Amino acid sequence: MRIAARHKNDIVIFDLEGEIRRSDITDVTLHQLVKEQLDSGKRKILLNFDAVEFIDSFGVGEILASYISTHNLGGKLKLVRISKKLFLIFQVTMLTKVLDIYEEEETALKSFF
Amino acid sequence: MAKNRLRSVFSRVVDLKPGEGVIAVFLFLYFFFITSPYYIIKSLRNASYLSGLGDEKLPLAYFLTAILMGFIVNFHSRLQVKLPRSRLIINSLIFFFSNIVLFWWLFERGWRWVPVAFWVWANIFAIVLVTQFWMLVNDVFNPREARRMIGFIGSGAQLGAILGGVLAGVLAKRAPWLLLPLAAGMLGLGILVVSGIFRWQRQKTDGIDREAKDRAAGPTKVGFRDAFQTTRQSPYLLLLAGIMMVTLVVSTLIDWQFNSIVQSSVEGESNLTSFFGYFNAGAMFFAFLFQLLLTSPIIKAFRIRGALLLYPLILFLGTGGIGLAALAGLVPLVPAILIKASDKGLAYSLNQSVRELLYIPISPEQKYKSKIFIDMFLNRFAKGLGAIILAVLLWLVPRAPGTQGGQGIIRYISLIVLVIIAVWVFLNFRIGREYANLVKAKLEKQYERGDLLVAQRLDVDYAKLVFDTVESKTRSSHLYAMNLFDLIRHDMLTPEVKKLISYKTDEIRAASLGGMFEQTETGLGPKIEEELSEDVLKREVQEILNLDVYQDVMKGYLERTVADSSADSQVARMEAAKMIGFMDSRAPLVGKLGELLEDDSPDVCRYAIQSAAAHMRRVDVPVLVRKLKSPALREDAIAALRKFGPRIVGTMADYLADRSEEIELRIVAASVLAAIGTQEAADYLTWELSSGAGAALADGIIDALDRIRSSDPRVTFAEDIIKPRISEETRLYCRQLVDLYNGARPSDETECRRRENRLSDSLWNVFKLLGLIYPQEDMIKAYQNLKAGTKDSVAYSLELLDNVLERDIREVVFPIVEDLSPEEKVKRCRDVLRGIGEGKAKDG
């Protein structure tokens, strides 16, 4: 999995690519990257899933841990451009009850304000 | 230069923030210029009435005032609806100014009814102007600002009263004709000051935030009926009204005792005016000193709840003394003077300040409506009630001829006063509690905790299992089938999940259990419910796995699979790890779990960890603890260890306390104890906190304790450990703040940020610790509003802490949470460090 960060105003957008799997773990996990941004004072995080093929239970744990860390500091973490299949799993597992998921980046960015 | 020196001297007396000086002085002068004329008027009022009509006619004056006040309140409410605040106040002042001139002329005529009219009018003068004054104060300040400045602003009234009293005392004998013109002149100056206040307010609201604008815009305008209904509907306002009632009934009875005793001791109208003038001046001098020196420290030290009790308790002792003196047949002039002076002094200092503070957490709308009813109408109604009690007593207990001061009735009055004071104390206890609740209600949570939101809305284990099931579809039909079976076992194979797994992909779709479900959903195959019920499936699979013959047959296969550590057999090992989880814990093949837990593949390990959680064998605990070090497996290992529950609390506490272990592992051990969340887990964490845990571990332990507190409010925490830790965290915060802001501030932005984060973490730790021994919700609200709130929400946070925290904790925490500029905060932190002998080192 590859993760690249970019900034729009005070929002940090993480472009995720590949699969978020336990077996594919890199030196720095998604949660650690989110925590670094939180430490630097950022409170609005957007995870772009456009190039994510699949995630396993480890990936779910990473997303939820990032969500909890952000929320505990009064911030917001949202997801965008998630595949239809993943969205279905998110719905079935009720992750959509917790996570805000948007179809388009522009809409997601606006939703922070 | 001189201006700065003046400001410096001023700031030592009054706790003012930049920009508050002008309005504070304006309000001080406003209060001064309405009380100084009133104390001239009041001395004249008492003397003219007592010498003209006598103390026996006093109940008539009280009663007439009460009746007339009802009309005045109604009229004032109507005016308030029609006029803006500025015009209402200025027009009222002009009206009373013209009345003074009118009474000056009337007194010259010597008509017998004039003292009665003057008495009633003087009371209306006081009640209307003082109520309007406090309305304006409430418009301008929030609770913290009011609390800081109330001592100074209130002292304007005492100084005015002293001046008015002294002028009345001196001029009554030398130039009595000058008293009323002088009062009119002072009120005229008051009109100029009030005009200045409204001009200042208009200029300020042009450029300030909306919050202040809303305050400055003034209240909702209401009528008398609305004011009454608002008070009636709120239990808090009813309590306030009740306290006002009993306070004034007591005050009226004491006032009569005092006037009666004075009348029998002082003769002649000018002597009486002079006596009342000097007495008022002396009492108000006492009030002034009390207000200036003691009101704020008393409120600060005893909080509103404690401060509320002081006034009734002093009156209780005083009136008891008068009663005893009267019982002994003495004319209790000295006790009467003392108790009246205490009554006046405390009423115009501590009591007034506390009462106004009690109004502050009420919504502006409620405040204005209820103030009209309580401060204006009920105030006089209570006096009327006092008058009725007096009239009844005077009728029941006639004075013996020749007795001075009417000792008989005086001791009865003392007795009644004692009973009413007992009711008063009870009401004060009640309102003290309600006040704290009201302040809490004013604070809104800025955001919900993420972990709680997730816990409330999600079944994380279920979500992960669904993801693993879908993921396993691409790996192996066996693994996929086992994951589906796991969903069935836990009654999680909902119609939604069935629909999900029938989702069309190009992935393998072997003739498996999953395939059968997919066929069912797509309508291509037989319906699974008809073929194989879920209950039958659960039972049959379980029976097969537990068969001895199955264990024998599978033994060889499992041994080969586990021994093959190549990447090609990874899926087979995953299947084996998953399958063992379904077996009975006594089954021989479960023994293979140990090897699978040590597998190099995190995917295999993950399934083995799940199976270890299902079997809960103590032998697996050390391996699971080792897995806590792996980022890929940590969450799974924590979840597995959590399932062991209280059985492993001692083991995890050993890891937590083991100084030879890596700090990372000890922190995660704290997380496991938090996940288990029992009282014993909390006790171990608390003990470790007290045994010199380093900063990183302490952070982890405090976080773990905080999580236990939020998941189970029944768990208790050792205060004798938590309180010193709060002090320690506060000192840590002070050290970090002083380091950050003294000369050694790092030029490196990253280092600066790191220190700021550490500072922020320390503050959060203080509040997490406070949440362990005080209501956690309150502490979270206070923290969130302090960190991200508006000016008012910060003020209410501090007010909440002030009311909830015990004195020793308040003194520790307030230096770091008070709403101060960075420079002031650094100074306070240096003081804290100096207090523990670190001052020199930190002064740089």
Image (spheres, rainbow, N blue to C red):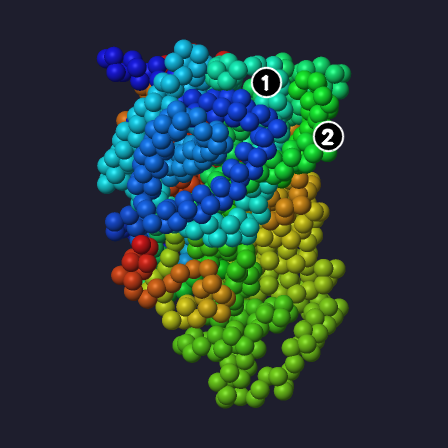
In the image, residue B617 above or below residue B762: below
Q: Position of residue B737 (x, y in %)?
A: 40, 26
Residue under numbered circle 2: B397
**Closer-to-camera residue (B572/B76):** B76
Residue B307 placement (x, y as % from top left): 57, 28
**Crowd around label 2: few <14 · some 14–19 · many ≥20 (10 Å):** some
Local SS, label 1: helix
Estimate the spatial distance between the alpha carbons at disc 2 and disc 1, rounded to whole Å.
20 Å
* Residue in view at x 44 percent, y 26 percent: B110
Rendered position, A72 above or below B515: above
The residue that appears at 38% across and 18% down in the rendered structure is B177
Q: SS at mark 2?
A: loop
Question: Image height check: is B537 above or below B48?
Answer: below
| Chain of the residue under label 1 | B
- A30 with respect to B775 (left or right): left
Q: Chain of mark 2?
A: B
In the image shown, does B596 or B40 lie closer to the viewer?
A: B40
Residue B72 can be seen, yes or no: yes
Q: Residues within 10 Å of mark 1 (few under 14, many from 20)?
A: many
* Residue B511 in picture, x, y percent from top left: 53, 80
Question: Which residue is depicted at the point 63% across and 86% down?
Answer: B531
Q: What's the residue type where badge 1 is placed?
A: Val
Q: Quick one: quadrant of the C terminus of chain B?
A: top left
Marking on residue B435: none
Q: Quadrant of residue B808?
A: top right
- Write the residue at 60% across / 68% down: B486
Residue at mark 1: B262
